Amino acid sequence: MSYGGARAFAAAFRAIGFDAVLSPEGDERTKELAAKYTSGDECYPERVTLGNFLKVTEQKNFDPSRTAFFMPTTTGPCRFGQYAPFLRMTMTKLGYDDVVVLAPTSANSYREIGEHALYFRRIGWWGLIAADILRRMLHKTRPYETAPGSADRVYESCLNDLCAAIEDRAAGKKEKLRSIAGCLVRCKDRFRAVEADYSRPRLLIGVVGEIFCRLNTFSNEHLIRKIEACGGEAWLSDIGEWVWYTNAEQKKNLRMAGKTLSREMLGAWLTGVVQRRDEHKLLDPFAEEFAGYEEPRTVMEVLELSKPYLPYTGALGEMVLSVGKAIYLQKKGADGIVDISPFTCMNGIVCEAVYPRVSKEYGDIPIKTFYFDGTAVNLENDVEIFMELAANYGRSKRVARRYPSYFKLAHAA
Ligand code: SF4
């Protein structure tokens, strides 16, 4: 999860009575601790999450009998399914048998969360959408701010307000949704009040890739800030996209199992309808704000774009989303695409093999995969070179970018 998404999710836990906090940010200690308990075969996100949980065990007030680590799980070939069992194994090895590893899956309807599971899923979803909206506001404001640090400060204060709205236990369900929506509208005004210079548009760089590494700024060594430092602005694929994808996959699997007309299908369909309705309630006030930054209307739009390269009926997971979204972003006028992937992740490797053809068929847009494994690399240099390529492409690209009204006003002035 992104920093904001994780904060919102922790607030959703507090709303149902858990004393939830964010796991610590990654740092050198994270890597040291992870290196002690891993073999090197694990993917980088696993090492970062494990290292951060191990940092919790070093905190002065750590009490194993009152601690649970939240680590969702899944099935399938991706190593993500190994994270929770490996965390459990490591805690046991350290003698922390009391520590609970809370590993809900969509397959068991998040039953592990207990009686509030349904309510938690709903407010957790609101939190994720709201956090995505705030991060989008940050990414489209920060590159243009005239006082460095001002957009980041607004972002922090907005997250504080959002979390307060989510965790308010006195508010009923309807009231809470209204309160989150109201908070987002106030945040929109706060971002717009950040002093910024929109008279010179920047290079627009689409950012796709593995979900953890692209959203976790420690893991990707703050790549987006580096893009901004080189004159770009980033359009980062959000977490909501993954939720829509898993919903679509669930329906596809039910159809394949001959359950097109079944209770499960009805449940999946209803969940989607409610989620979409809630998303509209939170997102609609941002229509003008996100003009030119519109996300695909449905995940099928992304999957269809990826189909000639990685048919979603056979290829699964983030690779289909990354390729489809890269094309979508090219069509929105992006000047270049960056794929953030952990070193040795098969999603990144498959995408990297496909990108040259995508680039060739979409105007030669530069697409570059940046791999991360926590070792020092000369990232600045690579970003600078990539931005040169993006600038070249930008000068001759055939797809014009659409700008929000405040850009036009700045140009008119
Ligand atoms: S997508 Fe890649 S990096 Fe992420 S959990 Fe799966 S194997 Fe690991």
Image (cartoon, rainbow, N blue to C red):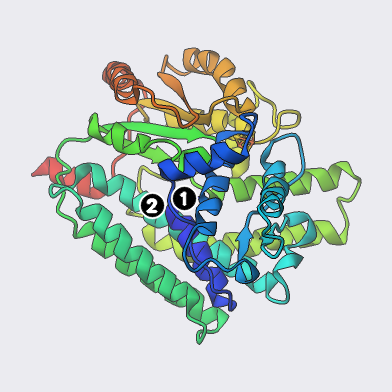
Relative to 253, is 177 above or below?
Answer: below
Q: Position of residue 93 (x, y in %)?
A: 70, 50
Instruction: Name the residue at 47% across, 16% down.
Output: 359
Which mark, by number, is residue 135?
A: 2
Instruction: Name the residue at 28% across, 16% down.
Output: 392
Which mark, by number, is residue 2?
A: 1
Amino acid type, residue under disc 2 in the picture: Arg
Q: Which picture quadrant has residue 117? A: bottom right
Q: Nearer the viewer, residue 34 or 317?
A: 34
Relative to 211, is 283 above or below?
Answer: below
Q: Residue furthest left?
A: 413
Q: Position of residue 112 (x, y in %)?
A: 74, 66
Image marks 2 and 1: residues in contact by CB distance under 8 Å? yes
Quarter holding the C terminus? top left
Q: From the viewer's perspective, tell me whether residue 82 is left or right of residue 382.
A: right
Q: Which picture quadrant has residue 316? A: top right
Q: Indicate which disc, 2 or 1, sits on the residue closer to the N terminus.
A: 1
Q: Residue furthest bottom?
A: 170
Q: Decide if ligand 1 comes within 8 Å of the CB at mark 2.
A: no
Secondary element type, mark 2: helix
- Mark 2, Cα crowd under 10 Å, few <14 / some 14-19 / many 20+, is many
Amino acid type, residue under disc 1 in the picture: Ser
Q: Decide if ligand 1 comes within 8 Å of the CB at mark 1.
A: no
